Image (cartoon, rainbow, N blue to C red):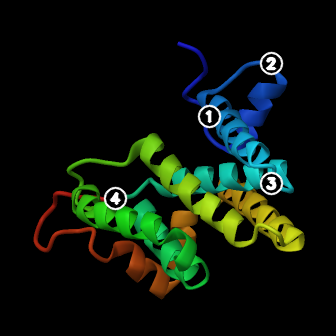
Amino acid sequence: MFGKKEVKGLKNNFKLLLKRNFSTGIIKAFGIIIIASYIYFIFKEEYWLLKGLIVALFSNLFNVFDLRPGRCLKLYFVFVLFLSYKSFQWNHNVYVVSIGILMVYYYFDAFGYCMLGDSGSNLLGFIIGMIIVEVFSLEFIKLLFILFALLLLEVYFDRYSYTKLIQRFNMLNFVDRILTERQGSNHVKS
């Protein structure tokens, strides 16, 4: 097997890389950056490397959020809700198909019958990253701001628990817990 699985967090992955060792997280991150950047490069997009980095960071952000049942899917739904006002005419097929499939899948994920895992959460982040990059395709300053914000989130979540952050805000905590625990059941403990 290639890569160490036990290394967690951005900082620890890069420390390992500096020692000329690879983690599965670094392999996955570079793979996503290469694929996303290549897509933008092939279509002769401006700022193709910047866009590839943004897509990779969104992919990782969704992976980080996939620790509690239903959380990653809720994040996806929130992003789709906010993005649809600006990009529905371009991406309505993506929205309709993904929302339809994911609303059915949500039940199974939220109540612990199955889980997205790294592949599923990375794919959802990849989709949202691609849509965001498309929406702000020609706005270099906004793309830089998005990249900077994602990097700040990565550093923050590498150091602090975002679950504790969510629990400090009643509205976020409510959204995090809604529709994830069956009434009167101990099936899902988070």
Taking the image as drawn, is residue 71 in sight? Answer: no
List the residue tagged with mark 1: 28
Q: What residue is pinned by disc 3?
A: 45
Q: Earlier in the sequence, mark 1 or mark 4?
A: 1
Tag 3: residue type? Glu
Identified at 67% across, 53% down, the residue is 55
Return the disc, 3 or 2, that comes first in the chain's sequence: 2
Given residues 36 and 66, the one toward you in this image is 36
- Label 3 crowd bin: few (<14), some (14–19), many (20+), radius 10 Å: some
Q: Are marks 1 and 2 in contact (CB under 8 Å)?
A: no
Secondary structure of the residue carrying tag 3 is: loop
Looking at the image, is mark 1 or mark 2 earlier in the sequence? Answer: 2
What's the mark number on residue 69?
4
Among the 4 quarters of the image, the one containing residue 101: bottom left
Could you say which disc has been placed on residue 20 in the image? 2
Label 2: how many Cα within 10 Å (few below 14, some 14–19, many 20+): few
Contact between labelled residues 3 and 4, with CB atoms less than 8 Å apart: no
Task: State whether residue 41 appears in this view.
Answer: yes
Q: Is residue 41 above or below residue 76?
A: above
Up the image or down, 86 lies above or below 160; here it is: below
Q: What residue type is disc 4 on?
A: Pro
For marks 3 and 1 on the same chain, the one whose residue lies earlier in the sequence: 1
Q: Residues within 10 Å of mark 4 (few under 14, many from 20)?
A: many
Name the foreground residue: 139 vs 126: 139
